[in-house]
Amino acid sequence: MVLNTSVYRKIAIRRCVTPQVKYIVCLALSLFTVNVYAIEKQLNLKDAIQWTLKKNPELKIFEFKQNMLIGRERTANLTPAYELDIEAENFAGSGKFNQFDSAELTVALSSVIEMGNKRSARIALVSSSRALLIAEKEVAALNLMAQVTEKFVEVLAAQQRVLLSENALDLAEETLKIVSQRNRAGATPEAEVKRSKAVIAQANLTVQSEHKRLEYLKLSLAAYWGETSVSFSRVNGDLYQFGHDSDFNSLFAQLENNPAIQIYANEQRLKEAEIRLAKTESNANIKWSVGVRRSQESNDTALVAGFSLPLFAEKRNSGAIASALAERDQVVVDKEVTKLRFRNYLLRAYSNRKQAILTANALRKSVIPMLEEALEDTQLAYQKGRYGYLDYVSARQELLNARRTLIDAASAALIYGAEIEKLTNEALSL
């Protein structure tokens, strides 16, 4: 997304010569840098993203998951535990075994010899899980950045809509002055004066509504880094700076850079580690024990030793291996499905962005200038009695609609650009 750090400043412009000049001054002041940090606190997109990545609780969850995997890694690195076995026989029975004199006491130490490099397979599985967790965190961060960017653009557009609503109020007041002059001259009925006053009342409601919407959007933006109140007055950015497009094939080739695609490579490595661990289970562990046995009756001692080995372990483990292989193959298919879905998203964002830029440029360069001239001509003609009230109002409304469409198109172009950047993990060139 292309948003520079130009600073906005709100000033009173009601005394400008014409409503058209008032709007141009508002727009110009919203695009050029002015040093007003001593007056009001500004927010740029870079700071909004940095605060979100630092404070958003969605990313803090990964710290706990990382600690969990560290614990799992310590456990996986452990060798089999030793067991102390104590066994007593031939006591508390009948006859000569009714006492402890004929008892036999055995104390033995036992453990397991792991076969098939099970320990290294467990460690490799945890390492792959940690790599996958890092990729998942990158995906979450990228999604958050895209959401913050979209909300930032909405605030930026809302600021322009506030200016537009104030400009519409200026135009309505200018219209009332002209209509009142014609009414006093007897050229316009009183009904047109009342209609003009009603338009002013509606314009005032629109101004209030746009201010409320702006405050809500600012609060929604601040919520991304955990603030419950807005600590900034305005956001800085250029709503009409779109950058340059790459061709679609180049953008599609960059889809491989998307962490959501790369995550499948990490997930595939995780599944490979699970397969290796499952295969090691086909090698049965050998359980051994060694100890000392003492006979109370003869007061003699002897060594005892033994081992045990499960049979048919490979056959019993074949189902787990088959399941792990199927899960690995599914990851490969899921990756291709995701790439196809992302390609459709990219195509939609690419096409819509081009159309939005085309619309915005056409409105700025030709449509709006012509409508401004048409409004001036219509206003002069109305004052001279050559045009009626509806002609004058229609010309004014057409200009306001075009300016509103310009804001919508420009914000759409930036939002679609942010979606392209999220999909490709690359910034659009200037």
Image (tube, helix red, strand yellow):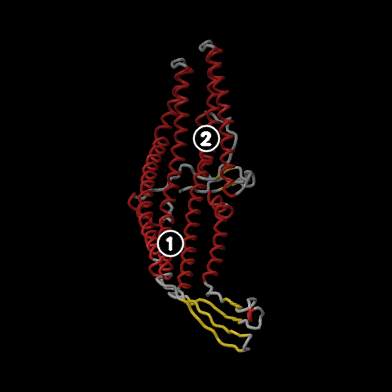
Left or right: residue 410 versus residue 91 is: left
Dot 2: within a 10 Å radius of its alpha carbon, few (fewer than 14), some, or many (20 or more) residues? many
Disc 2 and disc 1: Cα gap in Å?
45 Å
Image vertical order of residue 367 relative to residue 66, above or below: above
The x, y position of residue 143, in whole percent, is 48, 50
Residue 234 image position (x, y, % from top left): 58, 43
| In-image side of 251 versus 400 (left or right) | left
| Residue at the (42%, 38%) spot, across then down | 360
Pick whichever, 14 or 155, lies toward us: 155
The numbered mark at residue 161 is 2
Quadrant of the image occupied by residue 89: bottom right
Tell me: residue 249, above or below residue 287. Answer: above
First in sequence: mark 2 vs mark 1 = 2
Look at 50% across and 30% down and name the residue there: 20
Image vertical order of residue 91 relative to residue 237, above or below: below
Name the residue tied to disc 1: 266
**Which three-letter amino acid code belongs to the residue tagged 2?**
Arg
| Mark 1: few/some/many CA within 10 Å (<14, 14-19, 20+) | many
Residue 52 percent location from the top left of the image = 56, 51
Q: Amino acid at mark 1?
A: Asn
Nearer the observer: mark 2 or 1; the answer is 1
**Local secondary structure at mark 2:** helix
- Cβ–Cβ below 8 Å for labels 2 and 1? no
Percent position (x, y) of residue 428? 42, 51
